[in-house]
Image (cartoon, helix red, strand yellow):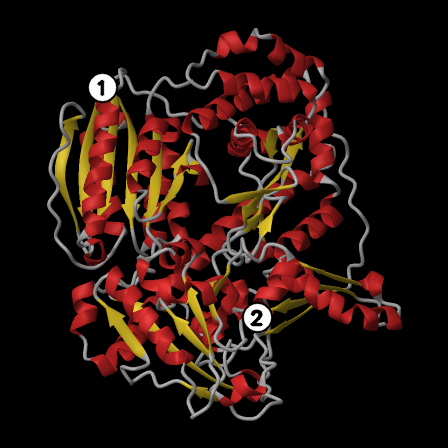
Amino acid sequence: MYDFSVDAVCYSSMLSSRDYNDFKPMFEAFGITDRIRYGTFDTLAEKILTESHGDVRQVAKEYLSTGSAPSMRAVSGNTKRVLIVDEVDVFCSEAFFGGSYNPILALKNGAITALMRHIWSLKASFNLPAIKSHETFRAVLSSGVLSAKNEWLLERAVMEMHDAARKMHTHDHVVRNGTILYKIPGRDEYGGDWTYNYETNVEYLKEFEAGTPDLTEERLKNHLALYVRLGEFSFARLPSMFQFILGVTGTLDPSRLPPQMHNILKSELHIEKFTYCPSMYHDSKRDWKPGDEAYVQRAENVDKHWNLIVDEIGKRLTPIINLQAQRSVLVFFRDAKEIEQFLDSSYFTKYRNEAQVLTELTASLPEDRERIIRETTRQGKITLASRMYGRGTDFKIYDDRMEKAGGLHVIQTFFSPDLSEEVQIMGRCARQGDEGSYSQVLLSKIGDGFDATPETVMGWDASGVYSELSQLRANIGGSAVQALREMAKARELEHDAITRALNAPGSTDGLDALIRRYNAASGLAIGPNGIHIVFCLDESGSMKGEPWSELITAFEAFWAQTAANAGPPMHASVVQFATNARVTHQMRPMQGSAPSLTPKWSGTRFHPAVLEAQQLIDKVAGPENGYAAVVVFMSDGAAADSSRAAKVLAAIAQQHLDLFQSYTVGFGRGAPSTLKTMAFANGQQDETKYRTAAVGDLTEAFKAVAKDISPGRH
């Protein structure tokens, strides 16, 4: 009505669609439907990118096929823009403030399909000259999708497809109507638009060979592609494109959203005024006593943890007054994998028939999501939910008897590193003046970056467990925000470089440089004296026990795999780090058995470890001494100095270019995404060198890194 265009964004496309449908009749009544767009940060970035620079994918497609860049044609849009951010505190997370929108051009035709299938058939062997002379390779060049000057991109695609085929790395996905839907990081949903490029090609071929229903020959042809990366566009840059910005959240109060997060909202999202509105409902009736051991319990191992959860479920199903009715219980876990393990355990047998599961997979269809949420508050119902549903999900009570029995009880089985997440999960009960209660049942290995050993947690007085953990959470908050700012800064610099290239009028050179930057080969050059691998291995207190045993197994597997491969000389040094760092092995030939590792438990700091690695590369064996250098950095927790560590590795990468790479491996649920900023290749940050490994999967992650480093693979 004031000639503004409004974008309303949310972290979840499901919640965004729900809200749009709720308000659509009003928009239609006022005649402003064409002025209001609902979506996620991804869809907003896509629209802003198109309005500012035109259809980037189409321009890149024309350039690749002709060899010359067409002029960028921006789509005219209203410059008077308003941004409304739902659950605005989510903007302060790694996925959004520290994240980026990364557009991909997928080139598809019958020739590309045939080439990808040919490479898949050769996964046990590889010969690039032979593939280049093969009819399928020549057919792609003849099909018109790539000009002669861009043949290099097809060569790179062949190498990446072969690399994906031999590694066979899988990602969490489902197949629906012949399409792979991936679990989208940081979101409560699976999406068909998400891709892992050539790893996705491989997963389609695997599913097809396994006879997956609905994945027909024709559908397979429609999904195999040649992928072209088109840059990184920072989410943190989006707010600057709007005249007015508004946000809403239920966790704005300083007691729920830490001051450092308020600072991000002020300085980066440009929110100047904060308004606190009282609830339209009565005072909360939530029963929650954090200083009472009946409300905060801890277990020394997984078996006891699950046993305590089952006992807590049984206790909380019981009505709080003498009534022939039962309450309902909603249990939040970190992820779907943990839910599956708990659901299948012998401990949960007696409640299995009364339980339902609410995860990104079980609720991937809107009708399933609505049904599960509606049934959560039925009498006697037990719902096991992943943490993503602790925010923005309204569990309404429709049964007066359930309300009289005490309402919905929420159990949280992990301690949130983010206070606002805890507040949101707690807020799923006792909503809108209803009865309800909340409790925590925790494993003593807290994880999620908390630097406290299980022995420390078990040694606390029962009444002080929550306050001790809350203090640890407050202590790491400032350092986490600093690391987040560093991530955002790196994204913004990349964003600015790309937009300059796109804004250059008729710049074929600029577009060529952009495409080469994100798609050129990133292989490790081999030094004349071989390769020096520097392991930086976490020996902090949280690694004590089974995690350390798993690390030893992974390290030995890496060593054995490397020793078994022919090639140039390979040497290894080991830096073990906690609060401080120490070199425990130096320039050991990677032959025979792996050397032993003995830990010294303490805190977690990354910077001392990479400084030791830098000394080993500069003073002992690195490019200056005829060795290619590789850092393999593994940690299971966050560190306050991760941004300083990343700067050291960035300096090494820029100095030695293709003679240096750094791989980072995040182990377990506590590993931070900031490890991505410490992964480098070819002188720049390279997230493909970042790996995650759940408990039980570290050996496979280490073997994948060893396989990636193996010289002479292309």
Instruction: Indicate whether 684 appears above or below 635.
Output: above
The image's mark for residue 569 is 1
Q: Amino acid at mark 2?
A: Glu
Q: Position of residue 69 (x, y in %)?
A: 72, 29
Q: Position of residue 84 (x, y in %)?
A: 67, 68
| Residue 231 in view of the camera | yes
Instruction: Indicate whether 158 appears above or below 675.
Output: above
Instruction: Indicate whether 383 appears above or below 499.
Output: below
In the rendered structure, the answer to whether residue 550 lies left or right of residue 191 reads left
The image's mark for residue 461 is none
Q: In the rendered image, which quarter contains the C terminus?
A: top left
- Which residue, given by chain and number where applicable, does mark 2 sit on? 375
Residue at figure coordinates x 67%, y 39% from the top left: 502
Q: Secondary structure at mark 1?
A: loop
Q: Position of residue 681 (x, y in %)?
A: 41, 33
Q: Residues within 10 Å of mark 2 (few under 14, many from 20)?
A: some
Residue 82 quadrant:
bottom right
Residue 707 quadrant:
top left
Q: Amino acid at mark 1?
A: Pro
Residue at figure coordinates x 76%, y 31% from the top left: 70
